[in-house]
Image (tube, rainbow, N blue to C red):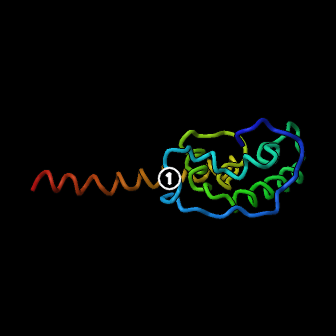
Amino acid sequence: MLQPPHSSLQVAAVPAPRVPARDRDQDAPWHTEAVCRRDEAGLFFAPSKEPTAARLSREEAAKRVCARCPVMVECREHALLQPEPYGVWGGLTAAERRVVLARRRRREMELKKTARPADRIAAAG
């Protein structure tokens, strides 16, 4: 994902060991351990005018790479915070990330609504 897109759909078969975030070198950026740095970036980004069946197959292959990545959570959060509008990041497609972001916004709105009456009671009491 950090390289320019290519057209190959090659997937590495050797899984990378998962290292808990607390055990990693805290000075190194998360993306230095990303499995996708060793794979074809074209797997993670759609070529123009890609047929639907090819896109779905490519995205599933990309998600398999993400599933074995030790920094998948960090990658996903990066893509959600930026927000990254294209490609597979942290095991989610752009459409899936939009759903996650919409759910987070709804949850935040609900939390704000439920917190307001308690704030009023605390201020009055």
Q: Nearer the viewer, residue 122 or 97?
A: 97
User: Does residue 42 appear left or right of residue 124 in this picture?
Assistant: right
Q: Quadrant where the C terminus lies?
A: bottom left
Provide residue 13's location: percent of width, then percent of height.
Answer: 82, 62
Question: Camera-side residue: 56 or 102?
Answer: 56
- Position in image of residue 33 (x %, y %): 64, 50
| Vertical side of 13 occupied by 35: above or below | above
Q: Is residue 41 above or below residue 10?
A: above
The reply, left or right, for residue 53 in relation to residue 31 is right
Dot 1 alpha-carbon crowd within 10 angstroms: few under 14, some 14 to 19, many 20 or more: few
What residue is shown with label 1? 104
Locate residue 53, reporting x and y percent.
89, 54
Residue 35 on image: x %, y % = 71, 53
Residue 7's image quarter? top right
Which quadrant is home to the N terminus? top right
Q: Residue furthest left?
A: 125
Q: Nearer the viewer, residue 90 or 116?
A: 90
Q: Name which residue type carries label 1.
A: Arg
Query: Considering the numbered disc 1 on the image, is that residue within a helix, a strand or a loop?
Result: helix
**Relative to 54, 27 lies left or right:** left
Residue at x 35%, y 51% (from the top left corner): 112
User: Which residue appears at 70% of the width and 39% of the height?
Assistant: 2
